[in-house]
């Protein structure tokens, strides 16, 4: 609670004490459900420990259950009702959530895996932000409980722990919509936010079960299928094997996991339309068209580059397509190590990590919609520059003409987030370049590692390992946090720490 205390002290100094107390009360009252949900997840994991005859793993989950449940109880006593919040409060709750939940969730890694504190926090942050980078060198040697715990973190993280909280605990109203937006979502599937949330979770569960069935048919054992379906459809990246999907050396398994990652990176509203009316698959919206176009072009470019670098067309095609799909969808599952790839292919993969999947999906990154809008805006600028001064120029996304105020708003948001995103990557690359051995790792490997972390991709090369410096691990955790929240809520939290709500 030190972050909240710091915010409170800043608000005290910034002016009206009553106003400061009001803001703090709103945030704390809406954090209650967050810790309650975390406690519920830990209670489930304790049951799993007993079912799997791994009672020795239970103490780690019991500690987290007691801690998160205790925090929820204290907050509930102090603040009996979740108060109505504004968008700024919702963003602060989201920013704090992706620090608080990983913080209380580290004990299974500390007590069961016997991991150092920094590594345990790294694993927890990577799981809840749905990134998939790991500090467990050989997850196949971990208990089944820990394997499932990692998968559940990513499965929940794919949709968002905030959305799980508001789906179960928060009453309908403005607060629910603002919390929904704080997880970087805007579109509704159903008329109300509550029904939209329930439909998203229903679709997510159906897709996950379908993934398990498909993986079983592809030849993957049942336990492996459950874990990999959860992390593939959630576009997470954790695997129960150190060599990932390469462990199976199975083309059918690679096809199924690749399809699951592609589906996970599609907007839930699009998936809902397809299920409701299969014929609508022939009428893709503009973002989905752009998404598949980028998938195709990127896969071709990476395959061509790796063929020139390595030779062996079939092997190059198989791994290049899979890993590019894994990168753009931010799925993070791997069939090979990127060590030895050419600079050009790594930079193409870095761009894919920055773009990410579609808005309203489980993916990280800037989202295809923003990239598409910036490209369309560039075309509009060219037209206005080249055409006569009195020419009327309009901008369309698909078949929809956008009004000038919408263009201004969307362009400002997209340009700001892209600018902040690239600045964060640049600063991280400069810092990380001083923390690794330059004789082993070149600048392209450093750039890709940072982009993979901030895009919540999770594909990792030899640079990211338990032996890397603690500062480097903390830096990558910050990148994961920034990427999961698309930076703005984090900046709002930092501003609150320094100035409170004083404008």
Image: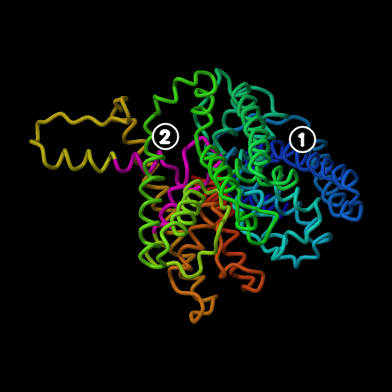
Labels 1 and 2: the sequence-earlier one: 1
Mark 2, Cα crowd under 10 Å, few <14 / some 14-19 / many 20+, is: many
How many C-alpha atoms fall within 10 Å of the one at disc 1: few (<14), some, or many (≥20)?
A: some
Q: 153 or 349: nearer the eye?
A: 349
Residue 17 numbered mark, or none: none
In the rendering, at what x and y percent does residue 343 appear?
39, 67
- Residue drawn at the location 35% of the way across and 55% of the way down: 301
Check residue 288 in the rendering and tell me which mark sits there, or answer none: 2
- Residue drawn at x 54%, y 23% as measured from the top left: 275
Of helix, strand and loop, which one carries label 2?
helix
Cα separation between marks 1 and 2: 43 Å
Left or right, 154 with respect to 252, comes to: right
Q: Nearer the viewer, residue 222 or 283?
A: 222
Residue placed furthest toward the bottom: 439
Note whether residue 17 is visible. Answer: no
Image quadrant in which you'd find residue 280:
top left
Is residue 123 depicted above or below 26 in this figure?
below
Q: Is residue 450 left or right of residue 471?
A: left
- Indicate left or right for 317 with 176 as reference: left
Which residue is labeled 1 in the image? 79
Query: Was residue 24 drawn as part of the magenta stretch in this picture?
Result: no
Q: Nearer the viewer, residue 292 or 485?
A: 292
Q: Secondary structure at mark 1?
A: loop
Position in image of residue 177 (x %, y %):
57, 28
Residues rendered magenta in the picture? 348-375
Q: How many marks?
A: 2
Residue 282, above or below 95: above
């Amino acid at each position: 609670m030190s972050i909240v205390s710091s915010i409170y002290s800043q608000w005290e100094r910034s002016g009206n004490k009553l106003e400061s107390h009001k803001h703090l009360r709103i945030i704390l009252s809406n954090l209650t459900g967050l810790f309650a949900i975390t406690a519920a997840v830990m209670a489930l994991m304790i049951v799993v420990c007993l079912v799997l005859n791994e009672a020795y793993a239970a103490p780690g989950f019991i500690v987290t259950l007691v801690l998160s449940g205790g925090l929820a109880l204290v907050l509930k006593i102090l603040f009996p009702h979740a108060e109505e919040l504004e968008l700024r409060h919702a963003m602060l709750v989201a920013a704090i959530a992706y620090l608080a939940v990983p913080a209380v969730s580290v004990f299974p890694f500390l007590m069961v895996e016997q991991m150092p504190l920094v590594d345990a926090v790294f694993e927890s942050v990577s799981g809840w932000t749905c990134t998939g980078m790991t500090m467990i060198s050989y997850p196949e040697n971990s208990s089944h409980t820990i394997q499932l715990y990692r998968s559940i973190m990513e499965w929940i993280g794919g949709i968002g722990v905030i959305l799980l909280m508001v789906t179960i605990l928060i009453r309908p109203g403005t607060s629910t919509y603002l919390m929904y937006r704080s997880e970087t979502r805007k579109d509704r599937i159903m008329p109300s936010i509550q029904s939209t949330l329930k439909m998203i979770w229903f679709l997510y569960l159906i897709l996950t079960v379908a993934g398990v069935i498909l993986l079983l048919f592809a030849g993957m054992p049942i336990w492996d299928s459950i874990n990999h379906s959860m992390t593939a459809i959630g576009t997470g990246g954790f695997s129960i094997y150190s060599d990932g999907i390469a462990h199976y050396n199975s083309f059918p398994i690679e096809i199924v996991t690749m399809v699951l990652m592609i589906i996970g990176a599609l907007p839930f509203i699009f998936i809902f339309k397809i299920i409701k009316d299969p014929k609508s698959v022939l009428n893709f919206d503009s973002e989905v068209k752009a998404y598949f176009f980028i998938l195709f072009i990127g896969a071709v470019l990476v395959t061509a580059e790796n063929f020139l670098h390595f030779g062996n067309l079939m092997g190059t095609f198989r791994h290049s397509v899979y890993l590019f799909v894994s990168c753009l969808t931010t799925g993070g599952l791997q069939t090979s190590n990127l060590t030895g790839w050419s600079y050009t292919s790594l930079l193409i993969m870095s761009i894919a990590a920055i773009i990410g999947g579609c808005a309203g999906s489980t993916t990280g990154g800037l989202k295809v919609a923003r990239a598409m809008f910036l490209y369309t805006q560039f075309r509009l600028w060219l037209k206005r520059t080249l055409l006569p001064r009195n020419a009327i120029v309009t901008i369309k996304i698909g078949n929809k003409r956008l009004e000038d105020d919408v263009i201004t708003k969307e362009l400002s948001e997209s340009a700001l987030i892209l600018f902040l995103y690239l600045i964060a990557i640049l600063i991280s690359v400069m810092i990380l370049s001083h923390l690794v051995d330059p004789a082993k790792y070149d600048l392209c490997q450093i750039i890709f590692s940072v982009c993979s972390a901030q895009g919540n991709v999770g594909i990792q090369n030899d640079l990211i390992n338990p032996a890397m410096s603690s500062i480097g691990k903390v830096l990558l955790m910050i990148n994961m946090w920034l990427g999961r929240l698309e930076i703005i809520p984090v900046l709002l939290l930092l501003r609150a720490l320094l100035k409170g709500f004083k404008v």
